[in-house]
Image (cartoon, rainbow, N blue to C red):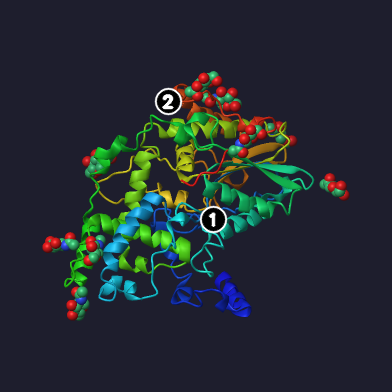
Amino acid sequence: MNLLLLTIIAIAEGASIYNYGFSENSKKIGTQEHLFQYLAGNAPYFKYPLDYGINLPIPEHCELKQVQLLARHGERYPSKSKGAKLSNVYQKLQNYTGALNGSLSFLNDDNYHIFWEDTSQLELEVTSKNSLDPLNPYTGEQSARTHARQFISLYGDLLEENSTLELFTTNSKRVHDTAAFFAEELDNAVKSTHMNIISEDSSSGANNLSPGYSCLPWDEDENEEYLSKYSSEYLEDIADRLNNENKNLPLNLTATDASSLFVWCGFEISVKGYSDACNIFTDAELLHFSYEDDLYDYYQDGPGHSLAKPIGSLLFNASVELLKQSDELDQKVWLSFTHDTDIINYLATVGLFDNGKKLNASSVPFLDHIYRKAWMTPMAARLYTEKFQCSNETFVRYTLNDAVIPIESCSSGPGFSCPEKEFYSYAEKKLDGMDFVKACDIKSSSNYTSLSFYWDYESVNYNASLLIQ
Ligand SMILES: *[C@@H]1O[C@H](CO)[C@@H](O)[C@H](O)[C@H]1NC(C)=O
Ligand SMILES: *[C@@H]1O[C@H](CO)[C@@H](O)[C@H](O)[C@H]1NC(C)=O
Ligand SMILES: *[C@@H]1O[C@H](CO)[C@@H](O)[C@H](O)[C@H]1NC(C)=O
Ligand SMILES: *[C@@H]1O[C@H](CO)[C@@H](O)[C@H](O)[C@H]1NC(C)=O
Ligand SMILES: *[C@@H]1O[C@H](CO)[C@@H](O)[C@H](O)[C@H]1NC(C)=O
Ligand SMILES: *[C@@H]1O[C@H](CO)[C@@H](O)[C@H](O)[C@H]1NC(C)=O
Ligand SMILES: *[C@@H]1O[C@H](CO)[C@@H](O)[C@H](O)[C@H]1NC(C)=O
Ligand SMILES: *[C@@H]1O[C@H](CO)[C@@H](O)[C@H](O)[C@H]1NC(C)=O
Ligand SMILES: *[C@@H]1O[C@H](CO)[C@@H](O)[C@H](O)[C@H]1NC(C)=O
């Protein structure tokens, strides 16, 4: 529908203004959405697949009191480090352009080139200006704008047309740019918007919207020994298959190269709207890759890591405070933009996707597999905390990526929400024993031992310089 519209507009405006013209790519855009959920959060946004059938808008006859958003930046180019790995594979293959067989034969096309024009695009949000295909409907810019309009439709009652709305973002350029596109759309609904740009640097200590970065003791490899038990056979199989399809060439693709090809597939869709690289994989291989991502995420940033919950407690505690103060605080809408890992840490603390079972490295699970990283934090992920009143009672509810996610132990309210008082005791239990400052030894790296930006933005100028990293 969107695609058709875009195509018609492009024809009407004369697509020849673009160097790209109507590429083969354009016809294929929109045909790979079924793959997004397997691509480790590198592919474009998709709705949370396990929708329980609960209406997204708050229940009828209820009145919104407050809404909080914790959002990931939109569709982006790969990071510099992933870009370097992808470049390596590309160079290996490019030596044989014209002679490749099988699922790599798309590289034989002279018009095909790697999906960035120069390395300065790495790390950045995909925008209408820098997207490699003008018909790419999945740019980070577009998803931020669409999201903002949906926000206005769901929560516009809380916006005050004559006041300034404060937004909060980290100083990562792509995170900031997502917030800025979102704010541009909100400018139609409020007098003005103002961005508070919070430094990601560890010197920000606890006054940080990306607390993982200020937790210096966090060790990514804490569970590496266990994680290394996950079989890489599926990657070796892919490398063997590609090498065999091209056995007259000394391709020598490795398991690591095969893993990079999944990253290629995901990011290329975000940048161009379609990726031929995705056709390399079988459905089983996509599942193995996707579960490997869940497993690593669980043990590096999720409930399986000893510091994930303490890190997530910083923002969760602030969220609970904002809920408690909803009557006193003038602003009823709290919009915050950060990275996927920060949302993952936060979700670990809240416990929305933690059924108490540790993810297992010995096989891909099917029953009881609720911990899906790509479902939680696809590009442009959005976690909302809603507070609403129905007759004389108040309730709290989460929605994630356009689906209501009830709290398993507290969903007796309208729309499977949690009665406010019960929510606070739930939160108290989850925050019990969590001490971000202590667990992350914040005092040794910063003088900021509490999160204050939601409360002191009027007196403190949060204007950190943007970083491309
Ligand atoms: C590609 O070919 C060049 C020239 O033959 C060679 O130097 C280079 O090592 C090859 N690159 C890879 C990654 O195989
Ligand atoms: C907003 O300001 C305009 C112009 O001052 C005024 O006409 C309008 O009534 C105000 N709206 C609200 C909701 O206060
Ligand atoms: C590609 O396949 C054809 C037909 O099977 C074969 O003749 C050719 O050698 C293969 N190319 C490579 C690079 O292996
Ligand atoms: C690829 O592997 C073959 C056989 O293992 C080896 O002879 C050749 O040197 C390798 N080529 C490259 C470019 O690494
Ligand atoms: C939770 O937030 C409140 C208000 O900002 C603060 O006073 C309290 O110290 C915080 N608790 C923790 C454990 O960080
Ligand atoms: C994983 O599964 C294996 C085999 O069922 C079992 O022996 C092992 O204890 C499990 N590990 C974890 C961390 O649950
Ligand atoms: C809400 O109103 C009902 C009916 O008037 C009453 O029974 C109930 O106690 C009230 N609940 C609260 C939380 O005030
Ligand atoms: C804390 O503040 C003092 C005084 O401004 C400064 O000398 C010190 O370097 C700061 N410590 C850290 C860890 O930032
Ligand atoms: C932020 O604002 C302060 C106070 O106005 C100013 O001194 C500082 O240079 C600004 N920093 C940036 C990065 O703009």
Q: Residue at x 36, y 65 (%)?
A: 278
Residue 347 vs 4, above or below: the answer is above
Amino acid at pointer 2: Ala
Q: Residue at x 35, y 66 (%)?
A: 277
Q: Assess whether mark 1 and mark 2 are in contact (beta carbons under 8 angstroms).
A: no
Looking at marks 2 and 1 on the same chain, the residue that comes earlier in the sequence is marked by: 1
Report x, y in % for residue 27.
Answer: 47, 76
| Whether the residue under disc 1 has CB within 8 Å of ligand 7 | no
User: Could you give the CA–CA distance between mark 2 and mark 1, rounded to whole angstroms?
Assistant: 39 Å
Quadrant for ligand 4 reads bottom left
Quarter of the image where the N terminus is located: bottom right
The numbered mark at residue 193 is: none
222 displayed left or right of 186: left
Please, what secondary structure does the residue beneath circle 1 have?
A: loop
Residue 95 vs 190, above or below: the answer is below
Residue at image mark 2: 439
Amino acid at pointer 1: Gly
Residue 339 vs 37, above or below: the answer is above
Report x, y in % for residue 313.
Answer: 49, 31
Q: Residue at x 52, y 23 (%)?
A: 447
Q: Which callout, 2 or 1, points to the residue nearer the camera?
A: 2
The quarter of the displayed image where residue 105 is located: bottom left
138 or 383, which is in the foreground? 138
Report x, y in % for residue 194.
Answer: 68, 43
135 displayed left or right of 327: left
138 or 389, which is in the foreground? 138
Report x, y in % for residue 142.
Answer: 58, 60
392 displayed left or right of 251: right
Number of residues whose C-alpha sits closer than 10 Å to that of mark 1, classed few (under 14), some (14–19) or many (20 or more): few
Residue at image mark 1: 53
Number of residues whose C-alpha sits closer than 10 Å to that of mark 2, classed few (under 14), some (14–19) or many (20 or more): some
Please, what secondary structure does the residue beneath circle 2 have?
A: helix
